[in-house]
Image (cartoon, helix red, strand yellow):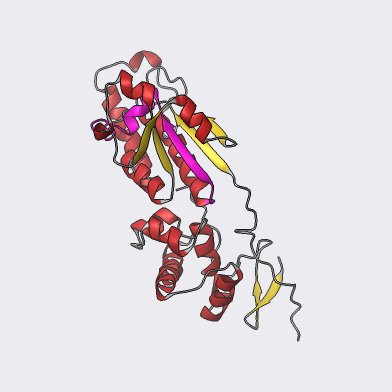
Amino acid sequence: MDTMTAPSIVPNFDNKETDRKLAIICSKGNLDMAYPGLILANAALGEGVETHLFFTFWGFDMITKSRMNDLQFSPAGNTAMHLPGHDMHIPQGLMPVPGMTNVATHMLKKQIAELGVPEVPDFLEQIVASGGHLWACRLSADMNKLTTEQLRDDIEGIISASDFIEMTEGAQLLFI
Amino acid sequence: MPVIEIAGKPVNVNEEGFLTVPSEWNEEIAKVLASQIGVELTPRHWEVIKFLREDFEKEGESATSRHTQTAGGFPIKEQFELFPKKPAKKMSYIAGLPKPKGCV
């Protein structure tokens, strides 16, 4: 019996040359808020999208050598916080007890690791290996009295907000 | 789902052209798939493809770029050199596997 075959189908991997560009502003230094930007940057790079990350304000902790391994997560003030796998909220009054931040940080890191997602410094290394560009905010560097020596070596420069806006002309932009 | 002929063999593919029955894949098919997307297979490419096939057998899902680095030992930077722009998708396409589902 003859098999009916359709004409060849080839995925459109490279034909859609759209020059798509993504700029992500990372302004938070909490462990849980560091990840959304990294996950999206990584996904964009895997799709061949030119990607730039700009670290500013608290987001500076993600690229400061002495702080990047010690990002923390606190459930205080986060009313969406519930026990893992349960719908029950933890009363906000219990959040500020001593040690809560350590416990919550440890739990979050464990959950992230179980999914095979790297820690923040390692994740940034992967983003750079994938062709991503990392930029530090001039004002944040001045405020924190930090120089390039104290930042990750793969930061391409300490630049002003206007430099970043100019560089990312035409890009889609995310503020996190 | 369409059935198309690749390297003289009818194979099941999805609407994008990814093989949907991994056991229908063979090396001749991989060569055609690679050339269709402009990838010239070197021995190093074959090492990656071999890893992907074995890993899929073990894990039941396609390896992400991250997993190909951590479990297979192929650095992400090299993956981008071997399979430019969209390594994870191109690797699974040539290896006759579904697109990776994982985010990272």
| Quadrant for the N terminus of chain B in the image | bottom right
Residue B42, quarter of picture: bottom left
Q: Is residue A29 visible?
A: no
Q: Is residue A156 visible?
A: yes
Verify whether residue B89 appears in magenta. no
Residue B76, quarter of picture: bottom left
Q: Closer to the camera, B4 or A62?
A: A62
For the view shown, which residue lies furthest in the top direction? A93
Task: Give the percent coordinates (x, y) of residue B96.
Answer: 55, 69
Q: Is residue A26 above or below residue B24?
A: above
Task: Give the percent coordinates (x, y) of residue A64.
Answer: 29, 32
Which residue is drawn at the image coordinates 37% and 21% (left, top)? A139
Task: Give the percent coordinates (x, y) of residue A60.
Answer: 35, 28
Asked if residue B37 lies left or right of residue A24, the reply is: right
Task: Give the percent coordinates (x, y) of residue A174.
Answer: 53, 31
Q: Closer to the camera, A63 or A72?
A: A63
Which residue is drawn at the image coordinates 57% and 68% (left, top)? B38
Q: Is residue B44 above or below residue A20?
A: below
Verify whether residue A57 appears in magenta. yes
Q: Closer to the camera, A9 or B82?
A: B82
For the view shown, which residue lies furthest in the bottom direction? A1
Number of marks in picture? 0
Write the start and end of the magenta stretch as one range: A47-70
Which residue is drawn at the image coordinates 32% and 21% (left, top)? A142
Q: Is residue A176 above or below residue A97?
A: below
Asked if residue A42 lies left or right of residue A150, the reply is: right
